[in-house]
Image (tube, rainbow, N blue to C red):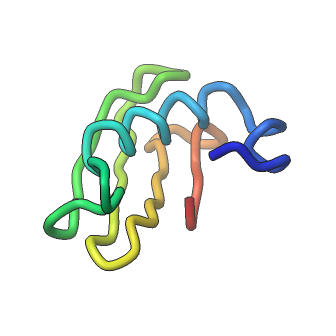
Amino acid sequence: MTTQTWNVMNKHRIAAITEVKLKHCPAPTYKPPADVRSTMTCPKCGGRLAFTVSSQTGISTGRCNSVGCVTWSAQ
């Protein structure tokens, strides 16, 4: 999470990804023990942000239910 692309990301997207990773991807593998499919409160608009995290790769995707709000893939 310290690449050049990470540094130019929207602060709300960074907050959402960080919350998901800290909660569901513990060290030392940085992968959840099982696939995760859940929701959280969107850090930008307060809406519902749905996300998934793969247990095989630790890669997450997410999308807020508000149009034009926080979204990410393959992070």
Point out residue 63 in the picture as x, y percentages from the top left corner.
48, 50
Q: Residue at x 33, y 71 (%)?
A: 54
Q: Nearer the viewer, residue 23 or 16?
A: 23
In this picture, residue 38 sits left or right of residue 6: left
Q: Nearer the viewer, residue 27 or 56?
A: 27
Position above or below: 50 against 58: above
Image quadrant where residue 23 sits = top left
Q: Residue furthest bottom?
A: 56
Point out residue 75 in the picture as x, y percentages from the top left corner.
56, 59
Q: Residue furthest left?
A: 34
Point out residue 62 in the picture as x, y percentages from the top left corner.
46, 53
In this picture, residue 3 sits left or right of residue 1: right
Q: Residue at x 62, y 46 (%)?
A: 1
Point out residue 12 in the picture as x, y percentages from the top left corner.
60, 27
In this picture, residue 5 sits left or right of residue 69: right
Image quadrant where residue 68 sits = top right
Position above or below: 70 against 52: above
Position above or below: 14 against 39: above
